[in-house]
Image (cartoon, grey):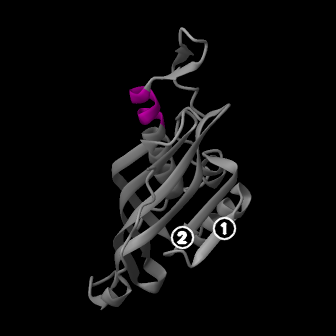
């Protein structure tokens, strides 16, 4: 038996996060506390994975900028705007017979300005669909852009490229497919 996250389950987490600590420099400009800002971005992406797996799509939407873009399924699915992303994720994953597990780690975050940053995350994920006796698992690299808003850091773009994806029969773990031919090099755009 597989337990399924309920979309109405309310996990007590503060959303949205307040702006990180900032202050004025002697010349009157803003100064960024890098370690605080880095942690705010990490917490943002962790919340993305948590709300995705708990099927809390409205809360996930609050983590995105209004004009956010996404590129899922190795870029085959591209979406523009917060609502389009939320609608697509909800449509693809909200079924009561679908269970997901997403682990994002090894973040590489770089600030491109005081209000923008990029991030690369290593993803390990698993999707279980018991009614189809299917389990999909694999790894990928997320390529994100973040923007500092009045509500704190938000995701302005997210998307991933697969390293590998395998399909198995959930009941026996028999390997069905392992499309090694689809493995492509991943390039991350870094400031220069």
Res 178 seen here = no
Question: Residue 174 location in percent, x, y?
Answer: 26, 88
Question: Residue 14: which quarter of the image?
Answer: top right
- Say which residue appears at 52% left-offset and 35% top-offset: 13
Residue span colored magenta: 34-40
Vertically, is 119 above or below 79? Answer: above
Mark number, residue 72: 2
Residue 185 sits inside the magenta stretch: no
Q: Secondary structure at mark 2?
A: strand
Question: Left or right: where does residue 88 sit relative to residue 184?
Answer: right
Vertically, is 22 above or below 106? Answer: above
Question: Residue 130: which quarter of the image?
Answer: bottom left
Mark number, residue 79: 1
Asked whether disc 2 touches disc 1, contact meaning CB atoms under 8 Å apart, the reply is yes
The N terminus: image quadrant? bottom left
- Say which residue appears at 54% left-offset and 37% top-offset: 113
Question: Residue 11 location in percent, x, y?
Answer: 52, 41
Mark number, residue 94: none
Question: Residue 136 location in percent, x, y?
Answer: 39, 77
């Amino acid at each position: 038996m597989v337990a399924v996250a309920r979309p109405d389950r309310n996990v007590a987490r503060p959303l949205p996060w307040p702006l990180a600590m900032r202050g004025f420099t002697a010349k009157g400009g803003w100064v960024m506390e890098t370690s605080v800002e880095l942690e705010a971005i990490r917490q943002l992406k962790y919340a993305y994975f948590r709300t995705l797996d708990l099927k809390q799509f409205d809360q996930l939407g609050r983590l995105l900028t209004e004009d956010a873009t996404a590129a899922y399924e190795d870029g085959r699915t591209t979406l523009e705007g917060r609502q389009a992303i939320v609608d697509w994720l909800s449509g693809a994953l909200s079924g009561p017979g679908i269970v997901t597990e997403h682990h994002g780690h090894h973040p590489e975050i770089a600030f491109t300005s005081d209000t923008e940053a990029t991030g690369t995350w290593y993803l390990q994920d698993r999707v279980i669909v018991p009614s189809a006796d299917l389990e999909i698992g694999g790894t990928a690299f997320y390529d994100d852009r973040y923007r500092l808003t009045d509500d704190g850091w938000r995701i302005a773009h997210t998307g991933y490229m697969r390293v590998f994806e395998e399909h198995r029969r959930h009941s026996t773990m028999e390997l069905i497919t392992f499309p090694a031919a689809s493995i492509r090099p991943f390039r991350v755009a870094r400031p220069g």
